[in-house]
């Protein structure tokens, strides 16, 4: 039982002491000063509320991932992302099977899930998620792993941020650098880079033709 008095918090625990016949012969009373623990917990709750307010203002979605139980907990249910519930059990399995991630991001998604489960210190991924407007939007997922006193990873704290506009602008810049302004075709360096990329790919048993 906890007692609060004059700014001091005490935890009272009573342990019965029994003899060989299981008759209670006495009790052991343990009193613990948990003032600092309560103060720290209260401060963490205030910081969590502040982070939620900042997330609401910025449009970010905060998350907490439980490594041992493969459980994802979001600070709130997303109003724009499909199937983004507050709590997702078996997260790494669900996110790979629901189909609301872009098919071309399969390898990046797999790597992100592996890094979550293994407890990598810092995690970053840029993937395309399907929103309620039935379109894929680019999102950045950033997380930091929390460890217990034995150094074992127990959870990942992070946020999901919509970066769709940034990625579109980057693609426009990339396209403008690849295309010749006079002909509207790929410029010489881009053609060379694409040919080298194709030639560097593993050759399959089937014959391939490359027309330039």
Image (tube, rainbow, N blue to C red):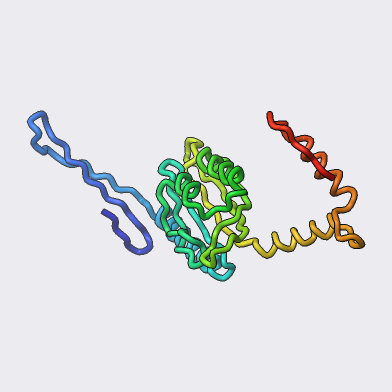
| Image-based side of 186 in relation to 205, left or right | right
The quadrant holding residue 21 is top left
Residue 7 in the image, given as x and y percentages of width and height: 38, 62
At x 68%, y 29%, the residue is 205
Q: Nearer the viewer, residue 160 or 17?
A: 160
In the current view of this chain or complex, which residue is farthest to the bottom? Answer: 57
Question: Can residue 38 be seen?
Answer: yes
Asked if 209 appears above or below 159 in the picture, the reply is above
Choose between 198 and 48: the one closer to the eye.
Answer: 198
Quadrant assignment for the C terminus: top right
Residue drawn at x 89%, y 58% as measured from the top left: 180
Q: Tell me if I can see residue 121 in this picture.
A: no
Query: Which of these two is toward me, 4 or 66?
Result: 66
Residue 157 is situated, as x and y percent measured from the top left of the image, at 52, 51
Percent x, y of residue 126:
63, 52
Q: Please state if 129 lies on the left or on the right of 35 as rendered.
A: right
Quadrant of res 59:
bottom right
Residue 90 located left or right of residue 102: left
Furthest residue to the right?
A: 182
- Name the residue rendered at 70%, 59% in the picture: 167
Image point (80%, 40%), residue name: 210
Tally the numbered discs.
Answer: 0
The picture places residue 35, in percent across and down from the top left corner, at 39, 55
């Amino acid at each position: 039982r906890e007692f609060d008095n004059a700014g001091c918090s005490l935890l009272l625990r009573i342990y019965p002491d029994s003899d060989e016949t299981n008759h209670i012969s006495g009790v052991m009373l343990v009193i613990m000063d948990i003032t600092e623990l309560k103060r720290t917990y209260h401060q963490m709750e205030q910081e969590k509320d502040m982070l939620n307010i900042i997330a609401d203002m910025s449009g970010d979605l905060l998350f907490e991932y439980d490594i041992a139980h493969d459980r994802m907990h979001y600070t709130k249910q997303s109003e724009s992302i499909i199937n983004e519930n507050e709590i997702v059990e078996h997260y790494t399995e669900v996110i790979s099977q629901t189909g609301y991630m872009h098919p071309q991001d399969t390898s990046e998604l797999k790597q992100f899930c592996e890094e979550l489960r293994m407890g990598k210190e810092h995690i970053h991924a840029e993937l395309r998620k399907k929103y309620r407007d039935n379109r894929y939007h680019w999102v950045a997922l950033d997380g930091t792993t929390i460890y217990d006193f034995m150094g074992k990873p127990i959870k990942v704290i992070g946020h999901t941020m919509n970066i769709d506009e940034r990625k579109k602008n980057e693609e426009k810049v990339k396209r403008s650098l690849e295309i010749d302004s006079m002909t509207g075709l790929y410029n010489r360096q881009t053609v060379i880079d694409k040919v080298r990329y194709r030639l560097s790919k593993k050759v399959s048993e089937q014959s391939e033709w490359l027309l330039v």
